Amino acid sequence: MAQNLKVCELGEGVADKLKKLRFRKEKTNSALIFKIKDEVIVLEDELEDMSVDELQAELPTSQPRYVVLSYCYKHDDGRTSYPLLFIFLSPSGCKPEQQMMYAGSKLNFQQASGVTKVLEIRNVEELTEEYIKEKLSFFR
């Protein structure tokens, strides 16, 4: 069945938005939220200078989403870095067709975004500052 799954295409301007996020100069958190509409991955929302709690509040609790987050990460030694994170939200309880479409398109979108730090969450409440810091410690 997976071989019959159609991978969704990137919508117009998505690659440009991802590139702009990658090379931004601001020293705050920023996120792009993407959804699939008519088998095309489109930008749903763009958040600037927000907390992880504010990002969490913007995400739907019953529909999948892709999030690319530029995160202001303060290391234990005092350094600050701005890693890009790809967050795949696939809540349990959403329609199986939606889950399959997002899961089938995830790798294509991840490669297009060029982001290598991938987090997968099944529940919006899992996305916390502590969770992100814990996961980032694995990428050192």
Image (cartoon, rainbow, N blue to C red):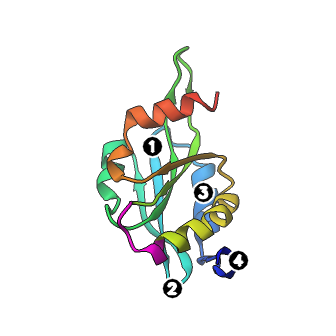
| Three-letter amino acid code at the position of disc 2 | Asp
CA separation in Å, label 4 and label 2: 19 Å
Labels 3, 1: front one: 1
Labels 4, 1: front one: 4
Say which residue label 3 marks: 20
Say which residue label 4 marks: 3
Where is residue 115 drawn, in percent x and y? 65, 50
N-terminal of the two: label 2 or label 1?
1
Relative horizontal placement of residue 132, taking residue 12 as reference (left or right):
left
Label 2 residue SS: loop
| Three-letter amino acid code at the position of disc 4 | Gln
Asked whether disc 2 touches disc 3, contact meaning CB atoms under 8 Å apart, the reply is no
Q: Nearer the viewer, residue 76 or 136?
A: 136
Where is residue 76 drawn, in percent x and y? 52, 16
Where is residue 72 drawn, in percent x and y? 49, 35
Q: Nearer the viewer, residue 121 or 19?
A: 121
Label 3 crowd (10 A; few <14 / some 14-19 / many >=20): few
For the C terminus, the quadrant is top right
Say which residue label 1 marks: 29
**Residue located 39% across and 60% down the image:** 91
| Three-letter amino acid code at the position of disc 1 | Asn
